[in-house]
Image (tube, rainbow, N blue to C red):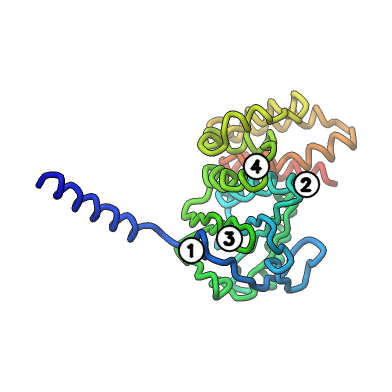
């Protein structure tokens, strides 16, 4: 009798969990529907494109964004860096903007600010997104991994962040195995554990000069105060100096620091530095 009562309680708990879980978009095993989006970057910029048809049966990472803020950046940026090193992976970020023209403009700004390399676009069907997808309004980010025209994994993300990027990348690695870029590992922080294994981390190569690598470490979320940012920026400016090559390199790397920096004052100073280096 005690066992029977336990099984009943477990069944009710599972039912409650299923009710609480949020769903957004097609689920694993279901087909990935085609849809049109207004391209903001890339060769199709300014045109409405059926990316799913263009991507074909390749591995696909499709991310729908309902709101754009720094937490969303911390999900998008590591995914962009990971995807940009894998030509076989087709990736698209879609902003669910109320107005497609404004959405296209905003996504161009986001792509420039974060130095995103994957295509970004705006929804042409407003905040609801493609009708066939059934995107949930309570979900900030819906990330879908697909291959051969079918969904492999779905992440309905209410609170975006680096930990969610880790889960997404974890689902991608069996499809497009390869080295995890060093700055992605750093941006993921403690969340990099889990499905990103130690074996994968051992393949990571430190790409940055020592001075820049140290700046990454000093801009961790635990220490990224305004004063800390000032000191880091002074060191980075000193390292870059008037060297055009170093200035271009540093401007391209600042988004990686932004991806792990939570303090608004520090982020503002880093954005300002990026603008100065690009002049």
Q: Quick one: 59 or 35, which is closer to the camera?
A: 59
> Could you say which disc has been placed on residue 65 in the image?
3
Mark 4–mark 3 CB contact (< 8 Å): no
Mark 2 neighbour density, 10 Å: few (under 14) some (14–19) many (20 or more): few
Mark 1–mark 3 CB contact (< 8 Å): no
Residue annotated with mark 1: 24
- Where on the picture, by quarter, is residue 64? bottom right
Residue that appears at 58% across and 38% down: 188
In this rendering, which labeled residue sits more in front, label 3 or label 2?
3
Secondary structure at badge 2 equals: helix
- Residue 12: x percent and y percent? 23, 55
Residue that appears at 60% across and 69% down: 97
In this rendering, which labeled residue sits more in front, label 2 or label 4?
4
In this rendering, which labeled residue sits more in front, label 1 or label 3?
1
Among numbered discs 4 and 1, the one appearing first in the sequence: 1
Among numbered discs 2 and 1, the one appearing first in the sequence: 1
In this rendering, which labeled residue sits more in front, label 4 or label 3?
3
Q: Please indicate whether residue 134 sits to the left or right of residue 49 in the image.
A: left
Residue annotated with mark 2: 275
Among numbered discs 4 and 3, the one appearing first in the sequence: 3
Mark 3 neighbour density, 10 Å: few (under 14) some (14–19) many (20 or more): many
Residue annotated with mark 4: 258
Residues at marks 2 and 4, CA–CA distance in whole angstroms: 14 Å
- Residue 172: x percent and y percent? 61, 47
């Amino acid at each position: 009798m005690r066992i029977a009562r336990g099984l009943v309680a477990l069944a009710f708990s599972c039912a409650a969990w299923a009710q609480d879980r949020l769903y957004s978009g097609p689920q694993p095993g279901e087909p990935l529907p085609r849809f049109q989006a207004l391209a903001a970057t890339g060769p199709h910029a300014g045109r409405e494109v059926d990316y799913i048809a263009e991507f074909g049966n390749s591995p696909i990472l499709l991310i729908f964004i309902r709101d754009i803020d720094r937490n969303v950046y911390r999900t998008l940026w590591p995914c962009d860096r990971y995807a940009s090193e894998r030509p076989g992976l087709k990736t698209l970020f879609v902003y669910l903007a109320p107005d497609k023209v404004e959405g296209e403009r905003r996504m161009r700004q986001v792509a420039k600010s974060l130095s995103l390399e994957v295509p970004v676009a705006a929804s042409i069907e407003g905040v609801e997104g493609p009708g066939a997808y059934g995107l949930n309004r309570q979900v900030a980010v819906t990330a879908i991994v697909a291959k051969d025209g079918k969904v492999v994994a779905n992440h309905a993300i209410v609170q975006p962040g680096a930990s969610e990027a880790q889960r997404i990348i974890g689902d991608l690695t069996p499809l497009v195995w390869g080295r995890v870029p060093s700055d992605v590992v750093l941006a993921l922080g403690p969340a990099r554990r889990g499905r990103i294994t130690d074996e994968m981390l051992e393949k990571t190569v430190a790409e940055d000069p020592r001075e820049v690598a140290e700046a990454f470490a000093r801009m961790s979320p635990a220490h990224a105060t305004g004063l800390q940012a000032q000191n880091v920026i002074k060191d980075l400016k000193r390292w870059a100096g008037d060297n055009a090559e170093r200035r271009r390199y540093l401007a391209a790397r600042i988004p990686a620091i932004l991806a792990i920096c939570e303090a608004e004052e520090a982020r503002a100073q880093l954005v300002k530095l990026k603008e100065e280096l690009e002049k």
